[in-house]
Amino acid sequence: MSQHDSWWSSFLNGCSCDPSVHETDTSVLSIEKQKPSQGDDPETDEPAMLPIAAQEPEDKEPEEKGIEDKEEIVELVRPEMLEEWRRQTAMEYNRMITESRRMHAESFTRAGPANRYGELGELPAFKEGRHVPTLALINPMSGAAAGMDILQVARRCDYYKERFFNIIDVVKGQHRGGLLDVFRIELCKAKAEAQDIGMRPRLISGGGDGTGSFAIFMIFLALKADSSRAHEGLEDTGNGFIWTDEEMAESFPAIAQMPLGSANDFGNILGWGQKYPGDVMCGSGPCGAREAALYQLQRWISAVIDPKSRIVNFDVWGFMPPKGSDQCNFKLAELTGQRGRNPNRKIDGKHQVVLKQAGKPVPFFVCLYFSAGIGAYMTSRFQINRRKTPLRNRAEYVRQLLGIVLESNPPQLAGRLNGVTIDCEDRPYFPPRRHLANQGRKYREVGFYNINWQAHGLHGKDRAPLGSRLCGCCASRQPVTFNDGKIDMFRWKFASFFKNPGVTMQTDKKEDMLLTFSAGAGKGVFFQWDGESRFAFNPKGEDFQIFIRKVLNVPVVIGPWVNTGLTGNLDNGDPVSFSFCGRTPEEVAAVKRRALQAVSGHLDAELNASAEELQAAGMHSTGGGT
C-alpha cells in the first residue's frame, strides 16, 4: 500500500478554505508596485476606508428610510470616497503580501543536521524564455526532511525562492494577504510567462503519493472565485473559478511528482524515480555524497523545467453521489487504538473496532487506486503504527497483515467481503457468481487500479485464459494505463497469486464503479484510496453506495526514468489538456460543483460522521459511543 507521511491528516485539519487573491492588471500586479502609506494600520485585515455615514448630507437619514437596496447605498457614496477606499485597500493588501513573502523566504531556514545537498549548493539556473515556468508545493517533512533541504537549496536562487513553497505554510496561510495569495500570484504569473513561449506551466508536487491529488486540490483552492473580493481579482468567470474553462484547459499546470514519501508509486510510474532525488547511502565525508546528491537533485529539476520533457494526459477519478442523488449516503470514521500488533480494544470478551471522527482529507480525487477489504483494513492499522524508515514500515505492513489473518473477525466487519456487491457500467461485476449465497466471503480484496504500480510491486493486465498467462504469449493483453478513460477492476483471494501466477492481477477495464454495502446495523467496510484508509457505514444501518467515475483529465510531466512496459502507450490520441469530465453537460457541471464543495469544506460535513452518528450506528468510539 502507498504510505503517507504522518503530517497528512494533522495539518489538513487546519484547512479553513478561505479564498484569496488573483493577479490581474488592475489589482495585484499594480498593487505590488505601490508603496505602503504611513497612515495604514498593519494590524488589521479589514480594508481601511472612510466612514460613509460621516460624508453624507445632514438631510439624509438612511436608517429611517430603510435603505436596503445595494444600488441605493452606492448612489450615496461619492466617487472620491470610493477612490480613497480602493487606494487604502490596495496599499494594505500590498503590505500583507510583502510580509507573507518575507516570512515565506525566512521559513526555508533550518536548524539541525547539515543540509544533505551541501550548504552552498544551488539548483540549476532558470533561463526565462528557454525553460518552462515552474512552481513547487513541497512537504518539508517528507523524505526524512529531504523536503526542507530542497526548499533551503531553492532559497539560494531568486527564481526558485519565489516559486518553491512549503505546502504546510500555504495551507496555513489562507487568510487575505497570506501565502495562498502569494501562491496564486505566482501561479498567474507563471501562466502568463508560459503562454508567451507557447507552453503550459508546471507544478512540482513533493511528498507522498497522496500529495499529488492534494496539489490538484490546492490549485482549485487558489483559483476559487470569491465575489466579496472581486475587486482584488477573484471575480467569478462563470464556472466558480477565476480562470475561464478555456484558461483552465490551456494553462492548468502539468504535475511533476517528486518522490518524497515511502512507497512513491505515483512518482515511480510517471518516471520520476522511487526515491527522492539525491538519496545516497552515506551522508558526508570523502565519498562526496553531498556532491553526488546535489548533482542528482539538479538533474531532476533540470528535467522538470526542460521544455523537451513530455506532457501527457492523466485520468483522475472521483467519489461522486450515486446517479439520481445529490449527496452520498454513507459516513466515514477512522480506526483508532493503541500502537501494537492489534490496535482493537477488547470489549465483552472480543476484540472490537474502535473508531474516531475522521479528519482530512475527505475522499474526492482518486489518482492511483481504490480498494475495499483486507488491504484497506491493514492500511488503517498501519497508520496507527507508522515507523520512521521505509524498511520498518514495510515490515509493519507484514505484521499487520499476519495479525488480521490470524485474528478473529471484529463484530463491526461482515467477514471478508460479505455484504459487498459492485456494479460497473450498470452491470454486475462482484462477486462473480452473485446468485449464490456468501460469495463475497471467498474474496479478500476488490477494487481498481488507475496506475500500474502498487505497494512496490502489484500490477495489472487484462484478463486472459490460464494458458496465455502461463506462456506469456498473449500479445494483446493490455496493462493498466492511466489515460485510457478506464479503471482496471480487480478482485483477489490468496489463491489468486498462484492462479495468475504472481503479482500481476487480472483486470477488467470499466468506465465506473458502484459499490453497495448491505450487512445491517452496526457494521461497515474499510476502504482505501491512494493509500489513505477510512471506515464507511450508514448511521441507520441501511444499505449505502460508493460511486466512483472519471472527474478530471489532468496534464502530467513524464520523467526520464519512465518504464513504458508498465505504463503502456502514453499517447491516448487526445490533445493534452485539462478538463472536467462527464458524459453530459449536467455531469460535467456536477463535477465542478463537487470540486467547489471540496475546496469550500462542505464535503467534510457531508461525509465525516459526527460523534452522535457514530453512537446512533452502535459503534464503539472515542467520542462516547456504545
Image (cartoon, helix red, strand yellow):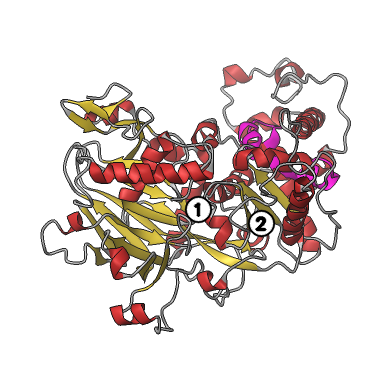
The image position of residue 328, as x and y in percent, is 33, 46
Q: Is residue 217 above or below residue 36?
A: below
Camera-near label (2 vs 1) is 2
Question: Does the magenta portion include 161?
Answer: yes
The image position of residue 1, as x and y in percent, is 43, 50
The image position of residue 246, as x and y in percent, is 64, 62
Read off the residue under disc 1. Answer: 592
- In the image, what residue type sits under mark 2? Pro
Q: Is residue 110 above or below residue 259?
A: above
Residues drawn in magenta: 155-179
Question: Which one is in front, 394 or 446?
Answer: 394
Instruction: Pick whichever of labels 2 and 1 is earlier in the sequence.
Output: 2
Please give the name of the residue rendered at 64% of the width and 50% of the height, measured from the top-left corner.
276
Question: Which one is in front, 391 or 476?
Answer: 391
Other-residue count near label 2 (Cα within 10 Å), few / some / many at <14 / 14–19 / ≥20: many
Horizontal arrangement in the rendering, residue 415 relative to residue 401 (left or right):
left
Q: Quadrant of residue 556?
A: bottom right
Contact between marks 2 and 1 (CB within 8 A): the answer is no
The image position of residue 504, as x and y in percent, is 39, 67
Q: Is residue 325 visible?
A: no
Q: Quadrant of residue 105?
A: top right
Q: CA distance from mark 2 to mark 1?
A: 18 Å
Read off the residue under disc 2. Answer: 253
